[in-house]
Structures are given as structure tokens and as C-alpha cells.
Image: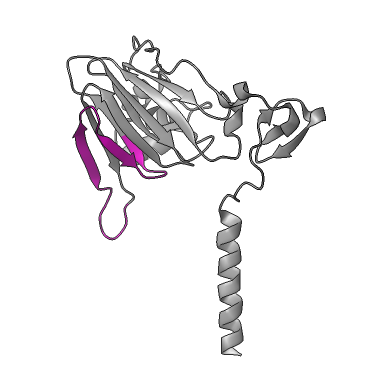
């Protein structure tokens, strides 16, 4: 009986793991399409009839163009995901270009659905991520200064950032392990949510006077994505 229960538990665990992960594509591609009447709904998007697919569905132009970094955080993220490149649908990858002014910051944020691997092509970046509080290590910080050609990986779901410590503009490209990785910028989410989070909640969470929370919630939280 015990052996039977063990076997059932193993099978249940395998089923749970399989159910929790994204399935592998069962077709060559599934170009995202907006016309519900002539498409099939797959993984959050409708799929164009493969016979109607064209090369443009798998192409995106413009990542060679520097973006405007004249904003409060001094950075600009150009995203190439399933919404801008329909051919990425169901393939589990996306790409971004990040431009940084001198002292420009890509603020602390997290991608809930993707690991990110970043390569610097211009300038010097100070980058880092913070772990969850596991194994007795409470939110350990990993940081590195990167120069052109250097690569750094930010594990899925962990808070991370990039800061231009150089005196010139910087550029980096990053690949992400999701067609739609999502982004949660920490300050924007905590102090700029609509409707706002209760002042009582934030006062207790950050252990500061409620006037500090009122001030922070009154700020304009810029979205560089």
C-alpha cells in the first residue's frame, strides 16, 4: 500500500510540474494575429493561418537607432516582444535595447516571467540583482561593473537594475526567456499604483512617517519602457 501511495505521489508531482511549465510548440510557428474570425487562439494570442504568414511577421527594424534618454531616469527601453514582432508568439523569447544617458538608470524592476541576459555594447554599467531571503541569506546583493562585450544574467523574477557609471552614453541589449516577460518597476508599482496602496500599509511596511509616504505617492513615476 505504501509503495502504491508513493507511486501516486510521484505521478502527481510529475503531472504538476508538467502542468506548471509552458508546453513546447507543436508547430513551426504561430504568428500572432488580431482577426478572431480567421485565427486560432493559442497562449494568449490568435494565430494567423500559416499559409498567410510572410517574412515581415518575423522581422523588426530599428534597434540600431538611439532612443531619447532625456527623462527623469535617464534611460529608454526599446522592447521587441510578441506585441511588436508577431512571429515571436509561442517561441518563448524576446529582446530589448536599453539606452542610458550619463548617470542614467534602468530602475530596480523585475520580470515575472523571464530570465534576462544582458550584453553591454557601449559605455560602462554598474548592474546588480537581489536574491530572495532563502537559506538564511536575507536579500543578498550581487553587483558587477560591465564594459563593452561583458555579459550578465538576471535570474527570473528577481529585482535588478543597471546604472551608467560612465561619462558617456551607454547601450546594452538583453534577451529574455519569454515572448512577453512583463516588467514591474518597484517604485512605480509601490508608490504609483492606481488606486494607491493604503498609506497605513506603506507606513508600516517602510517604517517611516506617513508624510514621507504622502510625498512619494504624490510624485510622477516615469515609465522608461
Q: Quadrant of the N terminus?
A: bottom right
**Quarter of the image holding residue 17?**
bottom right
Q: Give the residue at x 25% y 48%.
A: 140
**Quarter of the image holding residue 56?**
top right
Q: Give the residue at x 76% y 37%.
A: 40
Q: Give the residue at x 65% y 31%.
A: 31
Pinpoint residue 219: horizontal percent, then vertical percent.
Answer: 38, 18
Quick check: 34 left or right of 103? right
- Considering depth in this image, is 112 or 192 the residue closer to the camera? 112
Pinpoint residue 64: horizontal percent, then vertical percent.
Answer: 40, 16
- Considering depth in this image, is 33 or 15 the residue closer to the camera? 33
Pinpoint residue 21: horizontal percent, then vertical percent.
Answer: 56, 53
- Residues drawn in magenta: 133-160
User: Residue 49, can we see it?
Assistant: no
Pinpoint residue 20: horizontal percent, then vertical percent.
Answer: 57, 55
Q: Give the residue at x 58% y 80%.
A: 7
- Considering depth in this image, is 49 or 37 the residue closer to the camera? 49
- Considering depth in this image, is 207 or 169 the residue closer to the camera? 169
Above or below: residue 199 compared with residue 72: below
Quick check: 215 left or right of 35? left
Q: Quadrant of the C terminus?
A: top left
Q: Outermost residue toward the bottom?
A: 1
Quick check: 118 left or right of 49? left
User: Residue 52, can we see it?
Assistant: yes
Q: Outermost residue toward the right?
A: 37
Above or below: residue 20 compared with residue 145: below
Q: Is 113 a magenta residue?
A: no
Q: How is the image coloured?
A: one colour
Amino acid at each position: 500500500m505504501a509503495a502504491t501511495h508513493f507511486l501516486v505521489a510521484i505521478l502527481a508531482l510529475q503531472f504538476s510540474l508538467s502542468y506548471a511549465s509552458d508546453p513546447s510548440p507543436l508547430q513551426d510557428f504561430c504568428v500572432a494575429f488580431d482577426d478572431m474570425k480567421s485565427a486560432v487562439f493559442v497562449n494568449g494570442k490568435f494565430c494567423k493561418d500559416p499559409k498567410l504568414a510572410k517574412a515581415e511577421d518575423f522581422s523588426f527594424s530599428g534597434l540600431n537607432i538611439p532612443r531619447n534618454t532625456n527623462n527623469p531616469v535617464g534611460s529608454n527601453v526599446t522592447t521587441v516582444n510578441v506585441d511588436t514582432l508577431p512571429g515571436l508568439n509561442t517561441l518563448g523569447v524576446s529582446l530589448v535595447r536599453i539606452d542610458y544617458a550619463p548617470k542614467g538608470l534602468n530602475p530596480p524592476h523585475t520580470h515575472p516571467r523571464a530570465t534576462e541576459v544582458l550584453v553591454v555594447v557601449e559605455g560602462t554599467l554598474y548592474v546588480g540583482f537581489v536574491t530572495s531571503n532563502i537559506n538564511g541569506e536575507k536579500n543578498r546583493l550581487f553587483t558587477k561593473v560591465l564594459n563593452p562585450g561583458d555579459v550578465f544574467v538576471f535570474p527570473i523574477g528577481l529585482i535588478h537594475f543597471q546604472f551608467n557609471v560612465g561619462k558617456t552614453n551607454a547601450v546594452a541589449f538583453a534577451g529574455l526567456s519569454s515572448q512577453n516577460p512583463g516588467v514591474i518597476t518597484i517604485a512605480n508599482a509601490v508608490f504609483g499604483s492606481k488606486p494607491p496602496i493604503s498609506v497605513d500599509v506603506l507606513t508600516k511596511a517602510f517604517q517611516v512617517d506617513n508624510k514621507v509616504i504622502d510625498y512619494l505617492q504624490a510624485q510622477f513615476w516615469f515609465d522608461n519602457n
